[in-house]
């Protein structure tokens, strides 16, 4: 049985124990435009995003790109690109930033390690606010942003002592900054404009 068959069958057949999928399994799936991620060895599939989602992703990536081109400090990547946190935890954040001192985690086909910042743009509210937040906290991702275009806000989680506390909320009128890249700033109203 292939990983795709196993995933479509709900991960198990009869009394056969569920096998955790790995990065090798993920690589065996067809290139069909679906976004596939592994969290705890379980497959999550997301269809193509809506246009508003992509507009926000483009603004974020562009703001980082412009800043980094002028000031340096690291590299920014938009999805799709695999971030391998472990063999059973592989995500495709909408946008992520790898600080200059971490460039060794950037490979030719993926990023293998913990980036400085991971950003998810909703609509996957439960997965992004609970499942991925918990995963990123467990792997000690320094900063995690959830951009909620419908609620007109950005939730910023900062890892302190191995835990995320309450998120800082940024709304139109606020300026969003990144602790590890102090000169970077983006106007939330511009980011979330329709």
Image (cartoon, rainbow, N blue to C red):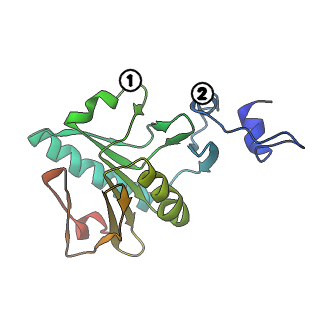
Residue topped by disc 1: 108
Q: Read off the residue under disc 2.
A: 24
Q: Is residue 44 visible?
A: yes
**Viewer-nearest residue: 131 or 186:** 131
Residue furthest to the right: 14
Q: Is residue 67 above or below residue 148?
A: above
Q: Could you say which quadrant of the image residue 13 lies in? A: top right
Give the x, y percent position of residue 124. Answer: 53, 62
Image coords of residue 7 (percent x, y): 73, 42
Residue occupying the point 45% across, 40% down: 80
Residue 168's x, y, as percent? 29, 70
* Marks 1,2: beta carbons within 8 A: no
As rendered, which of 63 and 93 lies closer to the eye?
Answer: 93
**Does any portion of residue 145 appear in the rendered image?**
no
Point out the image quarter for the N terminus. top right
Instruction: Looking at the image, tell me whether mark 1 or mark 2 is earlier in sequence order.
Output: 2
Q: Is residue 117 above or below residue 85?
A: below
Tell me how far mark 1 sits from mark 2, CA to CA: 16 Å
For image coordinates 34% across by 46% down, the residue present is 96
The quarter in which the C terminus is drawn is bottom left
């Amino acid at each position: 049985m292939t990983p795709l068959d196993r995933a479509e069958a709900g991960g198990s057949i009869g009394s056969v124990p569920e096998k955790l999928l790995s990065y090798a399994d993920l690589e065996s799936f067809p290139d069909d435009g679906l976004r596939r991620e592994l969290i705890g060895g379980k497959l999550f599939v997301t269809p193509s995003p809506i246009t508003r989602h992509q507009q926000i992703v483009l603004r974020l990536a562009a703001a980082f790109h412009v800043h980094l081109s002028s000031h340096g400090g690291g590299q920014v990547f938009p999805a799709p690109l695999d971030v391998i946190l472990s063999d059973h935890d592989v995500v495709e954040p909408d946008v992520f930033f790898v600080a200059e001192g971490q460039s060794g985690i950037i490979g030719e086909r993926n990023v293998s390690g913990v980036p400085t910042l991971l950003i998810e743009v909703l609509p996957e509210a439960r997965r992004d606010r609970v499942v991925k937040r918990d995963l990123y906290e467990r792997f000690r991702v320094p900063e995690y942003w959830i951009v909620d275009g419908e609620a007109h806000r950005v939730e910023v989680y900062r890892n302190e002592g191995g835990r995320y506390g309450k998120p800082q909320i940024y709304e139109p009128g606020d300026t969003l900054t990144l602790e590890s890249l102090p000169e970077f700033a983006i106007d939330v109203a511009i980011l979330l404009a329709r």
